[in-house]
Amino acid sequence: MRNGGKKFRHELKYYINYNDYISVRNRIKYVLKLDQNADESGEYFIRSLYYDDIYDSALYEKNFGVNIRKKYRIRIYNMSDKVIKLERKNKVGQYVCKESATISRKEYDEIINGDYKSLVSSKHPLKRDFYWEIKNKILAPKVIVDYDREAYVGKISETRITFDKNLRVSYTDNNIFNENIATQTIIAMPKMIMEVKFNEFLPESVRKMICIDAEDLSAISKYVFCRVQKNNI
């Protein structure tokens, strides 16, 4: 699906238990490939710093079921600063478009410290939009979200199935490179989140292999889930 010149993908989310995970994983691993970013355990670590505006629009729009919405985040993998991504996730119903721009460690440090000159001078539209949101909507960091991801990918319809485990929230600071940051577990094993992403259609072979009960289909947002938990602490 295209909207405003942007390509949107399907995104389905499920709460699943460990038995469902083992069952699905043992089937899809024969038709999909393990993500190349996985380590010897088959997983990789994701840490995201989510932003929201002065009105907490991303939080409340999700809770109130607003059909068209967006949110910004800065994301790293395996605690490395080799790849730092500024991302905007746009949503229209169950369709998702993720826009991304790479930033350097120097740019990240400047942004966190309130120095936005790299955003102002950038030719990348996402960086410029991010700066506009910061200045005009008082966009600011709100919460850090951590989890371990096991991902499988396929070429047909760019199918991607992920198992996100040990969802955690940080409520002590917003420095994503702080390895000693205190976190609280939000969703622990044996529960986890399975996400199914694809373009125009989900290949029939994959659809039959995941066969999760439709009642487990969820509108979960990791940001909202962790933000609410942080606010309750």
Image (cartoon, rainbow, N blue to C red):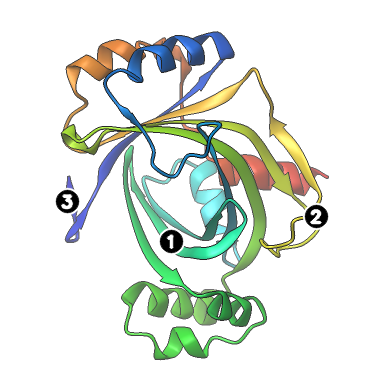
Disc 2, disc 1: CB below 8 Å? no
Disc 1, disc 3: CB below 8 Å? no
Q: Residue at x 54, y 86 (%)?
A: 116
Q: Residue at x 80, y 55 (%)?
A: 180
Residue farthest along the front direction in this orientation? 40
In this view, 30 is above or below 110? above
Instruction: Name the one closer to the observer, 139 or 85.
Output: 85
Q: Earlier in the sequence, mark 3 or mark 2?
A: 3
Residue 151 occupies which quadrant of the picture? top left
Q: Which mark is residue 121?
A: none
- Residue 14 coordinates in the image, percent (x, y): 46, 23
Label 1, label 3: how many angstroms apart (C-alpha)? 19 Å
Say which of marks 2 and 1 sits in front: 2
Of helix, strand and loop, which one carries label 1?
strand
Q: Which amino acid, by three-letter code, is at mark 2?
A: Asn
- Residue 106 coordinates in the image, percent (x, y): 57, 80
- Label 1 crowd bin: few (<14), some (14–19), many (20+), radius 10 Å: many
Q: Which amino acid, by three-letter code, is at mark 3?
A: Arg
Q: Which mark is residue 87?
A: 1
Give the residue pinned by disc 3. 2
Q: Earlier in the sequence, mark 2 or mark 1?
A: 1
Residue 142 occupies which quadrant of the picture? bottom right
- Residue 156 coordinates in the image, percent (x, y): 17, 32
Instruction: Name the one closer to the observer, 27 or 135.
Output: 27
Q: Residue at x 66, y 54 (%)?
A: 144
Say which of marks 1 and 3 sits in front: 1
- Residue 77 coordinates in the image, percent (x, y): 54, 53
- Label 2 crowd bin: few (<14), some (14–19), many (20+), radius 10 Å: few
Give the residue pinned by disc 2. 180
Q: Earlier in the sequence, mark 1 or mark 3?
A: 3
Q: Quadrant of the C terminus?
A: top right
